[in-house]
Image: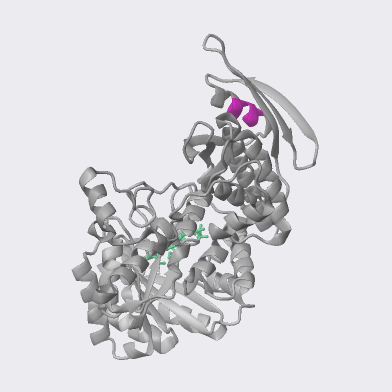
Amino acid sequence: MRTIKLYDTTLRDGEQTAGVNLNSTEKLEIAKQLERLGVDVIEAGFPAASPGDLEAVKQIAAEIKQSTVTALARSTKHDIDAAWEALQDTPHPRIHVFLATSPIHMTHKLKKTPEEVIALAVEAVRYAKQKFETVQWSAEDACRSDYPFLANIIEQVIDAGATIINLPDTVGYYTPQEYGQLFSYMKKHVPNMDQAMLSAHCHDDLGMAVANSLAAIEHGADQVECTINGIGERAGNAALEEIAVALAIRSDFYGCQTRLHLKEITYTSRLVSRFTGINVPPNKAIVGGNAFAHESGIHQDGVLKEKSTYEIISPELVGVASNALVLGKHSGRHAFRDSIKRLGLVVEDAVIDSLFQQFKKLADTKKEVTEEDLFALFTDQHMQLPFSMYSLRSVQVTYSSHNIPTATISLETPEGTIENHAATGSGSVEAIYHTLDQMISLPVQLKDYRLQSIGAGRDALAQVTVRLQHEQEEMNGSGTAQDVLQASAKAYIHALNKVLLQESYQRQRVHA
Ligand SMILES: CC(=O)SCCNC(=O)CCNC(=O)[C@H](O)C(C)(C)COP(=O)(O)OP(=O)(O)OC[C@H]1O[C@@H](n2cnc3c(N)ncnc32)[C@H](O)[C@@H]1OP(=O)(O)O
Ligand SMILES: CC(C)C(=O)C(=O)O
């Protein structure tokens, strides 16, 4: 069986999803989970994009041992140097350099002739090769490129030192048949193609990213680039979980395997969804809430008689627990630890005690503490920002159907002082957000507000996700609490803190 390498770009292309902005703590936590999942390569970011991203890539490279860590760079010395600064201490430094090769991109975006593009690509790969052990080169918008030109530039970048060649369907334009043929063509027409590995990178604009990636594998790609939950620029990238499970379930057809620990898939999906604020639709393959739910009588009858009638993937394969787990206020540390373990969460001893205290507090107010609640407690720990920022002490809202709601909020400031303030709004949430705007004065606009319950029942936890517009950027924030208004306040403060953090990075950049 061929082993296909899974190259995860959740932290780079996935982070290019509109409204997603991960801080370094969140990125590191996702990277650690990707390592547990068993991905071969983690594209941790684009170090030249911001000092925050450079720092995040550096931290990830220092922590991750089982997966290779790489980062993206344009074909400029500046970008390659930034990637080197972030990755130089890794045992096997690897970079991903790209340059567009389609007439549309070369003419309108790069404003370069095809000859200038070849020269720039070769120069960038040579420069990168002086520093990095492994250089991956991508022909951005490969699918809309002229094939003989593409074959020529690939031959030259391989001669310059690239050992991985990626052929991205940057705008999600191709069908599986065409994408497969592109790989066959390059295998046949690039004379030194045997000196490099081929990689696929697909976008989902026409809903064909996963099918295209699988077609590339059939035609010679040994690496596929994808993201958890298929997040990414515009309609997203190929979903890693769909590719991996398709290869596993249909190994009879593809004859390929991956190194992935499939049991980690569900948890990874939930973690990425929580940190990015991008919810997974219920009908999403593999990780959607309904992916293993049988609704209609005939299907239920079939599954009760014999699972394989309607189930091609067993939920346990991807880590969906078959029996729900219930903890309560009388549960002790042993049961708590056991539940954490069964959920597949990795918690260091140092934090288990504080997590247990939070669980006890929650169990006091809730009849049952479910798997979802434990997951929320766990992820909340990792949503804290790298240094102290604003935190919510209390929120109180006076509301009646005849009066204007008023919110009174008490906040702990980054300096450790307590500030109290009250303001009104046309609804309870707006009153809270007006109050916070007056306390933490930042030019932001609320673009999106989403509320969902974690688990079922009247005492379920509330999870709020907000998206704020700040200058040219969007920033998401998330908060969970037993009460909807408290979760709303926490989510808004989380997003404001992230804006403040980013402003502080930008100030550092100006002073540097
Ligand atoms: C297909 C992909 O997903 S590619 C990855 C996309 N990801 C991102 O862009 C996220 C991070 N990007 C950023 O933070 C910024 O765009 C930066 C820091 C990289 C660059 O910012 P700026 O210097 O302000 O340039 P800006 O983004 O406005 O324009 C891009 C420039 O890079 C050039 N460029 C684009 N691709 C490449 C490349 N592969 N190699 C060299 N130059 C390139 C463009 O032609 C343009 O050049 P110009 O200024 O001479 O017209
Ligand atoms: C940089 C490349 C690989 C990319 O993201 C794309 O072309 O979509």
Q: In the rendered view, does 133 fall on the left or right side of 265?
A: right
Tell me which corner region of the image, top left, top right, bottom left or bottom right, holds residue 245. Answer: bottom left
Q: What stretch is highlighted in magenta?
A: 432-438
In the image, residue 434 lies in the stretch drawn in magenta: yes
300 with respect to 418 (left or right): left
- Give coordinates of residue 387: x percent, y percent: 72, 51
Residue depicted at 54% across the width and 63% down the height:
33
Image: 444 above or below 266? above
Give the main secondary structure, helix, strand or loop, of the magenta stretch.
helix
Q: Is residue 227 visible?
A: no
Q: Is residue 406 placed above or below 417 in the rendered structure? A: above
Indicate yes or no whether the magenta region holds residue 480.
no
Q: Quadrant of residue 130?
A: bottom right
Q: In which quarter of the image is the N terminus?
A: bottom left
Q: Which of 221 and 53 is in front in this view?
A: 221
The image quadrant that residue 303 belongs to is bottom left
